[in-house]
Amino acid sequence: MSAFEVIARDGFAREGKLTPVSGIPLRTPAIIDPGELFPSLASHPFSNVPVTAPDSFAEKYTVDYEDLIVIGPGMKENPPSSGVGILPGWHVLRGNPRTYAELVLAFRTRTPPGIAWYAPASALPSNVAMLVYSGFDLVDYRAVDLKSAQGVFCTTDGELPAEEAFASSLCRCEGCREKDLRLHNRLALDAELATVRWFFRRGQLRELIEKRCRTEAWQVSVLRHFDNAYAMYEPWLPAVRSSPMFANTGESMNRAEILRFAGRLTSRFIPTRTDVAVLLPCSARKPYSQSQSHRTFQRAIQDRAHEVIITSPLGVVPRELELMYPAAHYDVPVTGHWDREEQAFVTGVLASYLRHHGYSRVIAHLEGDALTIAQAAAEAVGIDLECTCHGHPTGSESIRTLDEALTGEKKRSHNIIQGTLSFQFGSTISTKGMIIKGRTGRRKVLRGKQQLFSIDETTGLFRPTLQGWDALGDVYTVTIDDFIPQGDVLAPGVTTADPAIRAGDEVQVRGPRAWGAGKAVMGAEEMMQSIRGVAVKTRKVAKISDSD
């Protein structure tokens, strides 16, 4: 049986290394020759049971391949931990996006992470991005070869009659120059998969999918079904990304990262103060406090209120979190008007935030659609909203009115440390005596002379030292077996993992003989299921003596 190791992941999409029983290891996602890689397929012709077949039929006719694991109806309850799983007849689901999404979700929970997914005769240049996004690691040329036999010219934007495409000089690849349709279609699939890999490695596969899915309605439907399955999909997403997040479509608001951010505002975040809040408009520049408009707002507010930014697609960003992913990493088209979907989403997030935190005063320094959203949220929560804008928010009269509205309020600086620790770790520890020191790029959190955290400027995350973990307590813990890590912690050495852990999270490693700090490479669920691969990249490991 082949061995498969996941090297990087983004949702269900993975990059991995497949080592066949015989042959050269290949990096996935990849296009394969199934006859060469899996000889047993030739020994069992006409034996693939469709993934939509009833269990009774599948149990009777499913074949046990020597070099493949069948994923679908009739699959074994306890499949091997590593290998290649075939999902026969997957191409028929293009006409049934609901079933497509439901089966991906169902099979993902039933198959270990060490099984590479193979979709035979399914990949076209127009859909291979969605296949990878859905978790498929291996595809083949059979679908494009069939299109070639049918005289169909394949592109990332769909399929066209070959004669018209050649006559219009749509492509200048080697196949098109030689009028070789089969070669063109294969090269088109090669090129699109290379593009998918490139976007995956940049952390922007979602952006590519939001563009590509528009070629066919079924792909848009699949994406929406995945987004609706937040509870199942979110644990497989990384905690943060270092790349920009472009929210350019309606589907962007349903990204799991955005829903996760909004959820943590009510389930984790502890604001600096809850006596008075000022709702402010966002800015094109990130972080907001570096923009000219927000510098004007802050001079007027003078720390006399808790500053809360209203923005699409995130909904609400408290000032303490403006450096956290994705608050400092997103870009969105700005027209001056918010569509109904945006208004409904942001209104819901703001209403939930205000209901949870219960400010005694809420001032809306907003105009236009942002003010309409604030008014709707305030009405839903049953609070009185004070409005301070007269024309543009940065206009002199508006700024003067804001200043006057805060007369008599106490000054209290925003507690970035408390806000970040509560949001990132769900921590409610006292931050008394903690201060942030250092230049940009080398900032750290100290208590006295003791360093507790360094700050990752690319993501906004706090990186705890061992002393920092000691202050945080038993959170984000990866428990390991009775050994002292000599490098990174591999998945087989993990015994338990905090369910809150996602790939990219800062974690502590604890075992009978060692205590360490590092970054999770896998989410908690994958750590517990994997038999190979790095679970935690360690930065510091300390040996625990018998007296500890």
Image (tube, grey):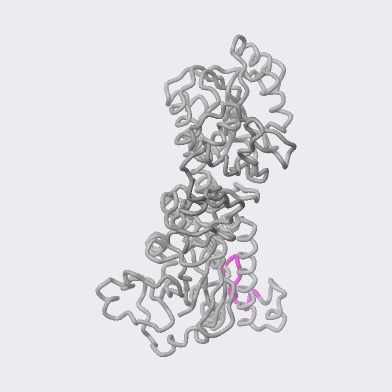
Relative to the observer, which residue lies in front, 516 or 386? 516
x, y (%) of residue 330?
63, 44
The magenta stretch spans which residues?
153-165
Residue furthest top in the image: 408
For residue 161: magenta? yes
Does the magenta-highlighted stretch encompass residue 376?
A: no
Q: Position of residue 355 (x, y in %)?
A: 43, 27
Q: Is residue 223 left or right of residue 110?
A: right
- Tell me if residue 97 can be seen: no
Is 165 drawn above or below residue 331 in the view shown? below
Most distant residue in the left direction? 56
Instruction: Residue 302 in the image: state x and y as whole percent.
Output: 67, 18
Q: Is residue 16 visible?
A: yes
Residue nearest the viewer, comparing 511 with 333: 511
Count of numbered marks: 0
Q: Quadrant of residue 180?
A: bottom right
Q: Residue at x 60, y 60 (%)?
A: 200
Camera-side residue of 173 and 547: 547
Question: Compared to 158, does 181 lie above or below?
Answer: below
Position of 404 with respect to 344 (left or right) is right
Q: Could you tell me residue 479's position as x and y percent?
A: 46, 53
Q: Which quadrant, please, contains the N terminus?
A: bottom left
User: Where is residue 157, by image quadrant?
Assistant: bottom right
User: Going 64% across and 16% down the picture, which residue do you hit?
Assistant: 402
Above or below, 239 against 95 in this view is: above
